[in-house]
Amino acid sequence: MYAVIRAGGKQYRVSPGDVVRLETQPGVSEGKIEFNDVLAVSPDAGQIARPQSGAMVTGEVLGEGRGRKVLVFHYKRKKQYKKLAGHRQPFTSVRITEIAFDDQKFTAPELPRKQTKPVREREQKKTPETQDASPTTAAGAARKQPKKGKATVRKKSPAGKRTAPKKK
């Protein structure tokens, strides 16, 4: 069972349970989204029907984000013209939950909800072990010392003579 829907000016072939990245969808309420613009439905293998009316695809919004960066580079040779721009297309991730057509409903199996981890309290009571690792003790002071950086490199002057490294 699959359906062809139109969303964001593009067409997508979806089945119940599929996760699709669509262009950012307006009108998303409570994590549910409905697609009324159904172009074709295939209830059985090898059959394709064009719904006259009443076909609907329902989905659950999983989240929103931005796609990978695409670099746009304009260049004109011999004219010293170069322009570089980046673009990240926003998207809405949708899981298709149901396809309804001619009084038939094809639904995706329910997925178990993810258990949310309990939020750690920032203000925890100090235990004796954490008090020993404070900067006043030797172990805590050694941990708080800055790490050694890279050795300074001498730079050559324009005349080729070595100069002393710059002081910070």
Image (cartoon, rainbow, N blue to C red):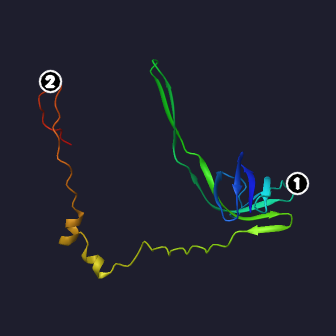
Compare residues 46 and 118 and report the one nearer the observer: 46
Coordinates of residue 4 in the picture (x, y in percent): 74, 54
Position of 120 relative to 158 (above/below): below
The secondary structure type at the circle numbered 2 is loop
Q: In the rendered structure, which amino acid carries the disc numbered 1?
A: Gln
Coordinates of residue 45 in the picture (x, y in percent): 75, 61
Position of the N terminus, as image quadrant, is: bottom right
Q: In which quadrant of the rendered view does residue 166 lie?
A: top left
The residue depicted at 34 percent of the width and 78 percent of the height is 126
The residue depicted at 80 percent of the width and 60 percent of the height is 56
Q: Mark on residue 159?
A: 2
Q: Mark on residue 113?
A: none
Pointer 1 or 2: first along the chain: 1
* Left or right side of 12 for 117: left
Position of the C terminus, as image quadrant, is: top left
Coordinates of residue 115 in the picture (x, y in percent): 55, 75
Query: For the residues carrying marks 1 and 2, which lies nearer the camera in this image?
Result: 1
Q: In which quadrant of the rendered view does residue 102 lie?
A: bottom right
Question: Tag count in the figure?
Answer: 2
Label 1 vs label 2: CA separation? 83 Å
Position of 43 relative to 150 (above/below): below
* Left or right side of 154 for 8: right
Q: In the rendered structure, which amino acid carries the disc numbered 2?
A: Ala
The secondary structure type at the circle numbered 1 is loop
List the single residue furthest toward the right: 52
* Left or right side of 47 for 76: left
Coordinates of residue 83 in the picture (x, y in percent): 49, 29
According to the picture, the residue beneath numbered tag 1 turns out to be 52
Q: Mark 1: give few (<14), some (14-19) or many (20+) Cα within 10 Å.
A: few
